[in-house]
Amino acid sequence: MIDIQLSGKTHYTDYKVISYTNDSTYIDTTLTIQKAYKFNHLRKDNFELLPFHNQGQTYNNLAYDYSDVSLFPEMGNRAMHFNYYEIKDIKTYKVPTPTSELAYRTGMQQGQFLDALLTFNTSKRHNYSIAYKGLRSLGKYRNTLSSLGNMRFTYSYQTKNDAYTLKMHITAQDLRNDQNGGLPELSIGYFESKDKNFNDRARMETNFTDASSFLRGNRYHLIHDYKIWQRNDTIRNKKSYLKVGHIFNYERKHYYYTQAVANKLFGDAFDTKIYDKLNHITSSNEAFVALKSPLVLGEVKFNASYFKTNYGYNSAVYLNNKQIPSSLNESSFSVGGTWQTHFKKFNINADAATTVSGVFIGNYIKASASFKQDSLFTFKGTFLTNSKSPNLNFILNQSNYIDYNWSKNLKNERTRSLVFDLKSDKILNASVQITQIDNYTYFNEITEPSQADKTINYLKVKVSKEFRVGKFALDNTIMYQRVAQGNSVFKVPELVTRNTLYFSDHLFKGDPLFLQAGVTLKYFTEYHANAYNPVLSEFHIQNDQKIGGYPVLDFFINAQVQRTRIYLKAEHFNAGFSKTADYYSAPNYPYRDFIVRFGLVWNFFI
C-alpha cells in the first residue's frame, strides 16, 4: 500500500473527515478490498442489497437493519431513497491544504458515474466543501434510463477558544428513473429460451415505455452551540463545560410519477394521462443544554424540539362516498436526553426521547456499552426500543390510478432490538441482531397497506474474516437470517455469502504500482423477494416466484499508482425480470450477461 507523501509540516492524519456525530477519521488513499466493495454509485458496501439491472435504479433488500431510532415517520417512496443523502450521510472536513477527490465509473450502455469533492480551510477555524455526484446510465432494456444528481455544500466554523462551533450543510438532489413495467409474457419466453435474437435486451418488448419516477429534494441544516463555561484539566487531559445549542432543519421533497397513457396493469384511472405529484415539507427546531463534568461522569444533554410536517397533494379525492384528504399537516413537540461517558476501556451511550404532544406520537430508548482491549478487539452491546408511525404513504396516498387512493388509520410500529458487535482484525468481525417488530407495516400482494397481526421475530448473524497466505488472500462474509414468526410477510434469504479470492503485491522496485487481482463469488438462498411497484416506488410481497439459489462470479483487477486507485471489473449484472409481469423486480434467473466496468478514484492534495 502507498501512503500519502506530504511535507514535514503535515501528516496524512491531519486530513480529517468528520461525521454528523463528530466522529473523526482521515482521508485514506490506500487500496483495500473493502474499498473495492464500496466502489459503486452509492459509495457504500452493498452486501445486503440486490441491485436491479441498471445502476442508479433501486435495490431489493437481502437483509434489514433496525439499529437507527427516530420519533417521526418518513416520507415513503423508499425505493427512490437509496441514493438520497440523509442528514447522517453528510460529512464535514478539516484539512491543512486544499483537497479534492474524484471518483469515476463507466455506466451501463451509454452512461457514466462521477462523484467530485473539493474541500479547503481558509484558516484553522473555517472549512468549506462542495461536492456533486452525477450518474446517467441508459440500461440494457427499453425505458430504464437512470439520471441522478446530488449536490452537497458544507461549512464549519470554530472560534479560537473553542467556545462557539457551527456546522451547516445544503443539499440539492434530483433523482429520476424511467419505468417500463417489466416484460410481457412473450418477451419472458424469449428470455427463458435463451433466444439468440434477443441477446440484445433492447429488442425485447416491455409493458410500457412512457413512464418515469422522480424524487427531488432540498435541505438546509444548521447545528451550532456556545460554551457558557469551560475548563481544561491539562493534568488529567479532560475538559469540562456547560453549553447551549440549537439545531435547525428544513427539507422540501417532491415525488412525481408520470405516464403518457394510463396502463391497465395498474387498474382503472381517472384520466388517460397520469401525473401524480406528492409534496413533503418538514421543519424542526431543537434547543439543547449539555453539561460535561467529572461530577456527572461524562456528558449529559437535555433537548426539546418542535417538528412540523406538511405531506400531501393539491386537492381532496372523493371515492366510493368517502373523502380522501388532500394532506397531513401536523406538528409535534418532543423532549429527550443523552448521556455519554468513558471509563477506562469502557464507553457508555444512552439516548431517549418522546413526543409530548401532536398526532404522530412516538418514543425511543437506545443504550450501548462498548469495551476495547487495546488493538486486539472491540466488543459492543446495544439495546433499543422504538415506537413510531409507519411511513406516510401507508397512511395517505393519492393517484390518478383509482386503486392507489387511500387514507388509513394505522397503529405505531414498535421495534425492540438487541445487537452485539465484535470487531477484530486479528480474530474476526461479527454481529448478531435480534429484533422483534409489532404492527409490522407492508404492502400486500395487491399493493395495499397492511399491518401484521403477529409479532415478527427476526435474527441476523453476520461474520467476516480474511485469511492470508503470502501474497494471496481469501476474504469471506457470511450472513445467516431466520424469521421465526411472520415469515409470510417479512421475507429474507436464509443465507447470503460473499467470498473473494485475490492476489496482491507491489510489482516494481520503489513500489510505484500496487496490484490486486481476483474473483468474487456471491450467493444467496432462494426466497420470495418483494416485487417492485413503480407507481409508489415501493416494494410489495409476492408469493408466485422465488429468486436466488445460484452463484454469481465477478472478476476484477485493481491497481494503485501514487494516490490514484484504478478499478477494472467484469461483472455479472441483473438481467432477469419477474414472471409476474406487472412490475419488474429482482433477478429470477441465473445471471447471463457480463459487462466490463472501468473506474478510478483520484485524490489530490495541494
Image (tube, helix red, strand yellow):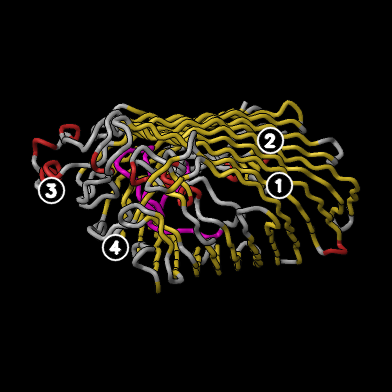
Rendering coords of residue 404 (x, y %) = 37, 45
Residue furthest out toward the bottom? 484
Three-letter amino acid code at the position of disc 3: Glu
**467 or 340, nearer to the observer:** 340
Asked if labels 4 and 1 touch by Cβ distance under 8 angstroms, the answer is: no
Binning the other alpha carbons within 10 Å of mark 4 as few (below 14), some (14 to 19) or many (20 upward) gives some
Closer to the N terminus: mark 1 or mark 3? 3
Q: Nearer the viewer, mark 4 or mark 2?
A: 2
Q: Residue furthest front?
A: 321
Question: In the drawing, does residue 200 fall left or right of residue 213?
Answer: left
Say which residue label 2 marks.
168
Give the mark nearer the N terminus: 4 vs 3.
3
Identify the disc placed on residue 525: 4
Q: Is residue 135 left or right of residue 555?
A: right
Q: Earlier in the sequence, mark 3 or mark 2?
A: 2
Q: Amino acid at mark 2?
A: Met
Label 3 with label 2: CB-CB less than 8 Å: no
The kind of secondary structure element at disc 3 is: helix
Helix, strand or loop for disc 1: strand
Secondary structure found at label 2:
strand
Please, what is the three-letter code of the amino acid marked with disc 1?
A: Tyr
Front one among 499 and 316: 316
Tell me the residue that label 3 is attached to: 192
Q: Is 428 placed left or right of 119 in the picture?
A: left
| Residue appearing at x 42%, y 42% in the figure | 318
Q: Secondary structure at mark 4?
A: loop
Real-space CA distance between mark 3 and mark 2, rounded to the nearest whole angstrom: 52 Å
Instruction: State the residue position of label 1.
Output: 306
Depth check, front residue: 138 or 78: 78
Image location of residue 527, percent across then percent down: 29, 62
Looking at the rendered structure, the kind of residue marked 4 is Thr
Q: Which comes sooner in the sequence, label 4 or label 2?
A: 2
